[in-house]
Amino acid sequence: MKKLMIISAAAILTVVLSTSAFAQATATQSVTLAVNTVYKIATSGNPGPLTITDATAGVDDLTSVSDNSTTYSITQNFDNTVKITAHLDAALSAGYTLGLSLASTKGTSAGSMDISNATSASAVDLVTSIQRGADAAQQIGYTFSATATAGTLSSTTKTVTLTLTN
Amino acid sequence: MKPLTQRHYRHIVLLLMTLAFAPNLPSQSSAASQILTLQVQELNSMLVAGPKVRFQFEREPTDEQRATASSTFIWTSNADSRKMAVSCQEASPAGKLRISIREDLSTIGIVKAEIELVDPTPLDLIRAAEKSAGSCTVEFSVTLKRSMDREKKMMAVLYTITSG
């Protein structure tokens, strides 16, 4: 009987002590989390000069030239319906044609599109249905062509703006 | 019908604000620009199509004889006021070589009706030619002199496009 009492007392003491050992104070904080809509597009630089230097006798279309040396990268978390449009600062004169293509692994590329007359009010869709996420180092392709009847063109700079938008 | 409470008015205001601003919400975008340098150089390209122009005189040249043949001249030029000239690289003692263009090229430039090549001096066949690409039939006419030897003669005709 005495032995039982000793064991019981020891058990009670153990429980009391162990309870005291795990006693702790708590505090809580409220954290407000938010992810805003993010649209980012950047290019790797400017393409080289597009200079037409050759023609075939009897053919009005001069030999076109291309540049595939630059890339673009995007990141967006808005939706799966985002697109990239392109426009020039000013339209090209008649007889000169500028084609632009954007590769894409996150969206649907329209292939080479004529942006000769695309201004900010009439931007051309280049990639559509872009999925959320990032798409890095995708190729930008330019093709410049002209007709003989359009005449020569002295060195001219044009600004092409790529816009990631919904 | 119950009168509208302050709570109702608050809901109506919230609804109107939502409707007012909703169309403007999705207009977010990001843009990047590239600078392009475009240029088209002056280009003049031409060729004469077809085999060699051959004249064959079957009979003995007892008098002046005339034979004709033709070839196709094809060009592309993106410059204004070009002239297309022809010359015979060496004077021909055999006879006279005349050249003319069969088609009406008045929309392209000023075409000389016929030129006679007597020495290497280039003669203008078409002047003040506008920017164009096209082709025309060049007709050659050779008048053989009576004193010509019965041997084969080669004559080279040079076409040039220059300013002017």
Image (cartoon, coloured by chain):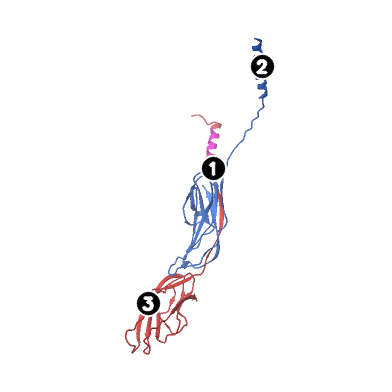
Q: Disc 3 or disc 1, which is closer to the eye?
A: 3
Question: Dot 2, how many residues are within 10 Å of its Cα: few (below 14), some (14-19), or many (20+)?
Answer: few
Q: Is residue A119 visible?
A: no
Q: Mark 3 is on which residue type? A: Ser
State the mark number for residue B21: 1
Secondary structure state at the residue bearing disc 3:
strand
How many angstroms separate mark 1 from mark 2 (CA)? 72 Å
The chain assigned the colour blue in the figure is A
Q: Is residue B162 visible?
A: yes
Q: Position of residue A65 (x, y in %)?
A: 50, 62
Q: Disc 1 or disc 2, which is closer to the eye?
A: 2
| The magenta segment | B8-16
Q: Mark 2 is on which residue type? A: Ala
Which chain does tag 1 point to?
B
Which chain does tag 3 point to?
B
Which chain does tag 2 point to?
A
Residue in view at x 53 percent, y 39 percent: B18
Question: In the image, is residue A80 above or below residue A91?
Answer: above
Q: Mark 1 is on which residue type? A: Phe
The chain assigned the colour red in the figure is B
A98 or A48, which is in the foreground?
Answer: A48
Question: In the image, is residue B113 above or below residue B37?
Answer: below
Secondary structure state at the residue bearing disc 1:
helix
Secondary structure state at the residue bearing disc 2:
helix
Query: Which residue corresponds to mark 2?
Result: A10
Residue in view at x 49 percent, y 75 percent: B162
Question: From the viewer's perspective, is B51 left or right of A36?
Answer: left
Query: Which residue corresponds to mark 3?
Result: B70
